[in-house]
Amino acid sequence: MRKRTQGMVLVAGLVALLVALTVSPAMAQQEQSGEGESPLQQRIQQRWEMVKQRIELAITRFNNNKERHIKVYNQVKAKVEKLLQQLKDKGYDVSKLESDLATWDQMIRKFAQDYADFIRKLEEIVALTPEQAQGSYASLIKEARQMLQTIHQDALNIRLYYQQTIRADIQELRAQLPEAA
């Protein structure tokens, strides 16, 4: 019986040693991969990943909107430039329309730059770690929202400038008699 007890103790010791050897690497791997985090830290990490995904989706949407807006503005600008050239060839005085078109082009460039800055700000937010985000997320989002308001105002200014200034210039040119070429 004594031999049997010693044998069982020996087997139990070997099993314990074997378990310890297999568990130790697993625990080390857990610590390295972050699986040993507290439930609160895991929840914060999961929520931050969800926030990042939403922001990345918004970045994609804003990039598409930016490209679409700029494309439309440039198409309208090209039509006005074509009309300007035709009227110039017929002998109309298009100097006012030329200067207004240059101003409008600067407005479009400002819009594009403001939009790019806004998207860069969102990308800056996505690049944060959960720890960094806890301290600066709210202020960065507030800045991004203010930048978005600026973009909306830029778009409104571009639209109004076209409607109220460029169109008015074209109407004045229609009423004008061409100069003899």
Image (cartoon, rainbow, N blue to C red):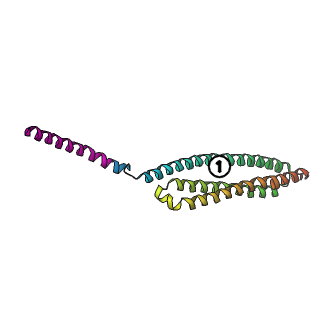
Can residue 129 be seen?
no
Q: Is residue 26 above or below residue 124?
A: above
Percent x, y of residue 33: 37, 48
Q: Is residue 46 magenta?
A: no
Q: Is residue 13 above or below residue 103?
A: above
Q: Residue at x 8, y 40 (%)?
A: 2
| Relative side of 129 to 78, left or right | left
| Relative side of 63 to 108, left or right | left
> How many circles with numbers are drawn on the protein?
1
Q: Is residue 25 magenta?
A: yes
Mark 1, Cα crowd under 10 Å, few <14 / some 14-19 / many 20+, is some
Residue 157 figure quarter = bottom right
Percent x, y of residue 58: 59, 48
Q: For the N terminus, which image quadrant? A: top left
**Part of the protein shown in magenta:** 1-29
Percent x, y of residue 65: 65, 47
Q: Residue at x 10, y 41 (%)?
A: 6
Q: Which residue is mark 1?
A: 66
In this orientation, which residue lies closer to the viewer: 57 or 101?
57
Residue sticking out furthest to the front: 1
Q: SS of the residue at dot 1?
A: helix
| Relative side of 29 to 48, left or right | left
Query: What secondary structure is the magenta-colored segment mainly?
Result: helix
Percent x, y of residue 11: 16, 39
Q: Residue at x 89, y 50 (%)?
A: 174
In this orientation, which residue lies closer to the viewer: 148 or 36?
36
In this orientation, which residue lies closer to the viewer: 178 or 171?
171
Q: Say which amino acid is labelled 1.
A: Lys
| Relative side of 141 to 163, left or right | left
Can residue 26 be seen?
yes
Q: Residue at x 71, y 46 (%)?
A: 72
